């Protein structure tokens, strides 16, 4: 079971999906594109099994977790 974790000012929202389920995979890819397209988030990390997290700009259906984090605002 793969997970997309979306961080925001209230905490996080987790979206779980089965990469073997075509419909769930399409929804997860749409969610990835919507978050990336809107530029609401500062970036995202894909955490593949047994590897270190890497910055990603494309949907990876093989990643165990994908973490979307908000832009940091300083002042």
Image (tube, rainbow, N blue to C red):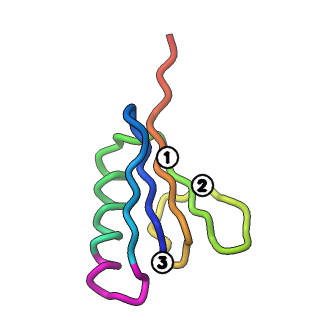
Mark 3 vs mark 2, CA separation in Å: 21 Å
- Image spot of residue 27 (x, y percent): 27, 72
68 sits to left or right of 54: left
Disc 1 packing (10 Å; few <14; some 14–19; many ≥20):
some
Residue bearing mark 2: 55
Q: Is residue 72 above or below residue 22?
A: above
Residue at position x 42%, y 39% in the image:
11
Q: Nearer the viewer, mark 1 or mark 3?
A: 3
Query: Tag 1, which secondary structure?
Result: strand
Q: Which residues are magenta?
A: 18-26
CB atoms of marks 2 and 1 within 8 Å: yes
- Image spot of residue 53 (x, y percent): 66, 59
Residue bearing mark 3: 1
Q: Of marks 3 and 2, which one's residue comes earlier in the chain?
A: 3
Residue at position x 29%, y 77% in the image:
26
Can residue 45 be found in the magenta stretch?
A: no
| Circle number at residue 43 | 1
Query: Tag 3, which secondary structure?
Result: loop
CB atoms of marks 1 and 3 within 8 Å: no
Residue at position x 57%, y 62% in the image:
46
């Amino acid at each position: 079971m793969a997970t997309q974790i979306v961080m925001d000012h209230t905490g996080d929202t987790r979206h779980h999906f089965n990469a073997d389920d075509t419909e769930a995979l399409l929804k997860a890819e749409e969610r990835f594109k919507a978050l990336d397209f809107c530029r609401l988030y500062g970036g995202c990390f894909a955490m593949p099994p047994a590897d270190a997290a890497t910055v990603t700009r494309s949907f990876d259906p093989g990643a165990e977790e994908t973490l979307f984090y908000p832009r940091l605002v300083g002042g």
